Amino acid sequence: MSMLEMTEREITFSQAINEALAEEMRRDESVFIIGEDVAEAGTPFKVLSGLVEEFGTERVIDSPISESGFTGIGVGAAMTGMRPVVDIMFGDFMTIIMDQIANQAAKIHYMSGGKLKVPMVVRTNLGASRRSAAQHSQSLHVWLSHIPGLKVILPSTPYDAKGLMKTAIRDDNPVVFFEDKMMFQDKGKVPEGDYTIPFGVADIKKEGTDITLIGTSSMVQVALEAADHLAQIGISAEVIDPRTILPLDKKTLIDSAIKTSRAIVIDEGYASYGVTAEIASIIADGAFYHLETPVKRIGAMDVPIPFSPVLEDLTIPSSKMVVNMAKTLCGRS
Amino acid sequence: MATEVIMPALSPAQETGILIEWFKEEGDLIEKGEPLMEVETDKANVEVEATTTGILANITVNLGDEIPVGKVIALILADGESVPESKKEYSSSETKVSEEDTAQLQTTISNPLDPSANLPTNKIVASPKVRQYAKKEGIDLSFIKGSGPNGVILMEDVLVNQSSTETEENDIPTSKGWRLMADRLTESWSSAPHFNLVRHLDVSNLVTYKKQVQEKNSNRLTYTDLLIKLVSITLKEHPRINASWIDNKIVKNSEINVGLAVDFDGGLIVPVIHKTDELSLGEITNRRKDLITRTQAGKLRSGDLDRGTFTISNLGMFDVDSFNAIINPPQAAILAVGRIVDKVVPVDGLPAVRPILTLNLSFDHRVVDGVRGAEFLKTLSNLIENPLQSG
């Protein structure tokens, strides 16, 4: 495609996902979608609208409310040559499909000595601030990141979402794809037609020299907002989006921290034992002799996400928190 | 067990103390609560009492030594106890890091917002980057003062220290700010051709005006505030003075931002009040007060030192009559203010006693010549002698 197409067209995050799925389903007949409310309703977030009309109910399948059941169908279908996209309506329901994912999907390639593969994508979401209370607001992506055999994808822009979804569908092993519920309407430039983004390649969203801000999923936007504020007071922040946390592009993270001597890791999962802990540890290890300050982490407060909007907003990382921490680290508070 | 006598922290920011006097000698019995030693801090001299009863022993420092806070300087032994062997090994400069200390360090570092809160102050605390660099370059960090939170040594501190020449015995240690001042004023003095204009002013009306305004205000008004106001009015009328010599051109400054020469930590610093021509006298007083307080507390914000277009330096409080000030580049002028002193002057042909203020203006001749400078000084003098005209 030409550069003109690349720069001109803006679509939403939700449209980018929809486009990636539609293009892959046209390209490869083995790709199908299964999940609750995926066909007639196009999911509660309307991400899949129009797909059942084009591909029919044989390839966009409304399942009963039984996440472990239809995820098991996905694992079996994948083992026998299909490429299922299993739709888990809320990331919180990971609890129910954990055995299919962690004990079956992640293990089969290894335990069968490579004779069987599970080329399955689990599409689900994370993120609070939708006033959906404690059982529909969690960011549990770290659970999956703990399991060898899985890949965990956290796109932060429409462009990344489309390219990474295509890579996920074409991957021969199970991939869990987390989208932030609050990003579906975010717009961005997305090329028409086919392109893929490799896993394990971080993206420097903004270059800077004084401090590295590593954000995942919607926290990339929080980091960019913080970087704008910091620029106004003369602190140049570099914003890095790992894009996939399993595999993780350690080199880009470490190189940036070596360059700036300071780093803050921001992720919407719980701080304790979280994604931020893993990334901070990798940076502390790889960049230790180049650091001026301890590597800092900002994650969700370690509480059930409150329903009260006022309280809910306090539990998740904000750009203000990032700015204040960055100022402290740069000796500017 | 022997009780350690340490150099106490008598104020939150204190890093070292000077031992002035021992009230007891080694071998003397001292009772808990009795004065043990006198310590000089940057703020005051303080008597320190013994924390326990026993025999004073193993004094490891000399009178007059500057001692880091937290350092063990003596022991108080219980009855029949002798100095433990391990303690005897302590030399005056040695610090030991035990496993327990390291653990404490790690615990504190995990504190979410202040990475260095409550770090032990008697050991070298430096960032990993600094440690690696110091090892490579063979730098002794114990001589470097850290500028990070709670004195953590950061790369900037090492680089500044390296750029300064070797310290000889008689050298007075200079801060980064001091060296910056030295550079800037040398640059000004050697590049800007200075000339000075001096006037003695009868400030009877100003004194009265100040009293009148003060009666209506709760915040204490100073002559500096009045001068900032009057200088700003004058600068507006004489934009040529509110200008700079840049790249062989005279460039007018769009804002009027008056800087004040302030003594901070033993050196000159010039914080700026911005757009003073748009501020009322009351607003100037508030800004000046806030700015000076923050300057002296070391809490200047970014921008506080930037974009000054004119500077006022007042040494009247030190009973100076008049002085020649060096221009603060790239500004074109600086006003040196002396004290107000009663003098006998002729009034209507008769001797009279009047409060007299001497103004001494330094100008950069590349921007301002004698006549333009004199015109500026004339307007300013008229305003000072008749402050009611200022509105």
Image: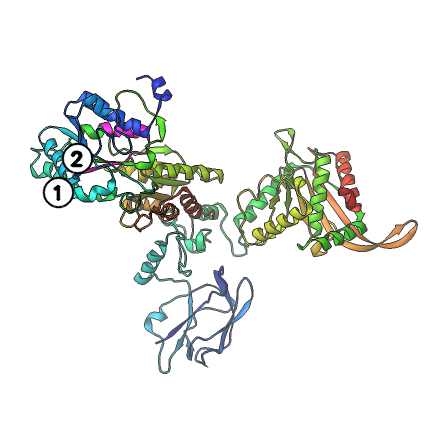
Q: In the image, is B184 to the left or to the right of A148?
A: right
Looking at the rendered structure, the kind of residue marked 2 is Pro
Callout 2 crowding tier (Cα within 10 Å): few <14, some 14–19, many ≥20? many
The part of the image, by quadrant, that contains residue B218 is bottom right
Q: Is residue A197 visible?
A: no
| B299 or B336, nearer to the observer | B299
Q: Residue furthest right?
A: B349
Q: CA distance from mark 2 to mark 1?
A: 12 Å
Query: Which residue bears the numbered disc 1?
Result: A103
Helix, strand or loop under label 2: loop
Q: Upstream in the sequence, badge 2 or badge 1?
A: 1
Callout 1 crowding tier (Cα within 10 Å): few <14, some 14–19, many ≥20? few
**Above or below B140: residue A201:** above
Q: Percent position (x, y) of residue B307?
A: 59, 39
**Above or below A333: residue A220:** above
**Above or below B370: residue B206:** below
**Above or below B98: residue B197:** above
Looking at the rendered structure, the kind of residue marked 1 is Asn
| A17 or B57, nearer to the observer | A17
The part of the image, by quadrant, that contains residue A183 is top left
Q: In the image, is A301 to the left or to the right of A247?
A: right
| B236 or A51, nearer to the observer | A51
| B323 or B149, nearer to the observer | B149
Q: Percent position (x, y) of residue B221?
A: 69, 53
Chain part drawn in magenta? A149-166
Helix, strand or loop under label 1: helix
Question: Does the segment drawn in magenta span residue B145?
Answer: no
Query: Which residue bears the numbered disc 2?
Result: A174
Chain ID at mark 2: A
Q: In the image, is B141 to the left or to the right of A43?
A: right
Q: Percent position (x, y) of residue B39?
A: 51, 68
Q: Identify the disc placed on residue A232.
A: none
